[in-house]
Image (cartoon, rainbow, N blue to C red):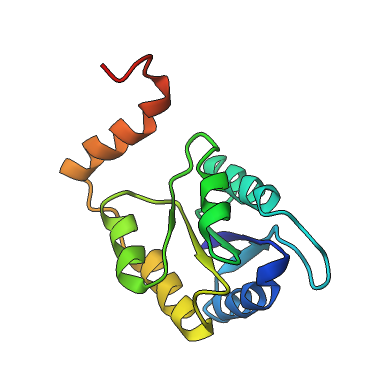
Amino acid sequence: MKIAIGNDHAAVELKLHIKEYLEAQGHEVIDLGSAMGERMDYPRPAEAVAKRVVSGGAERGILICGTGVGISISANKVRGARCACVSEPVSAQMCRAHNDCNLIAFGARIVGPQLAEAIVDQFLTTPFEGGRHARRVEMIMNLDERQSCD
């Protein structure tokens, strides 16, 4: 699988760990994040990874900042991105199964390397269930097109 990964300066070490973990499994990893010693505000890698995924240049995206919150909010500003901020494997599984998330985010200050591996495993191996969830995902994707909440 082709996976885009991005991070800010707070998450370089965890990004490198996850990148190595994914490559060892045979995945192609596109690194769009901060390198060691390079300061980077989280909206930049969030946008780069989300655009890569939405355009089809990667099948999934993984984003890491200090908490995962800011980078996930930023990614969700890209039309077509569905990014969940998760801190354990069950949420990673459910965001795929029920929400067809194409990106996940987590925090380097929140999860350690082994937990991050478990989160990534669930995110990459869980299929979208479709069915009643497909209608809801469509509703989510159309939210910004509505003129009012009435």
Q: Quick one: 87 or 16, which is closer to the camera? A: 87
* 91 sits left or right of 46 in the view: left
Query: Above or below — where is 14 with respect to 49?
Result: below
Using the rendered image of the protein, determine whether residue 131 is visible from the camera's viewpoint.
Answer: no
Q: Residue furthest right?
A: 37
What residue is rendered at 45% in x and 71% in y? 120
Query: Above or below — where is 27 with respect to 78?
Result: below
Quadrant showing the C terminus: top left
What residue is rendered at 54% in x and 38% in y? 77
The percent position of residue 22, horizontal first and vertical second, equals: 55, 75
Q: Residue furthest bottom?
A: 114
Q: Quick one: 37 or 58, which is closer to the camera? A: 37
What residue is rendered at 28% in x and 60% in y? 94
Query: Above or below — where is 146 with respect to 51?
Result: above
Q: How many numbered circles are shown? A: 0
The percent position of residue 139, horizontal first and vertical second, equals: 29, 31
Query: Above or below — where is 55 with respect to 87?
Result: above
* 112 sits left or right of 5 in the view: left
What residue is rendered at 59% in x and 76% in y? 23
Q: Quadrant of residue 135?
A: top left
Using the rendered image of the protein, determine whether residue 130 is visible from the camera's viewpoint.
Answer: yes
The percent position of residue 88, horizontal first and vertical second, equals: 37, 73
The percent position of residue 149, horizontal first and vertical second, equals: 30, 20
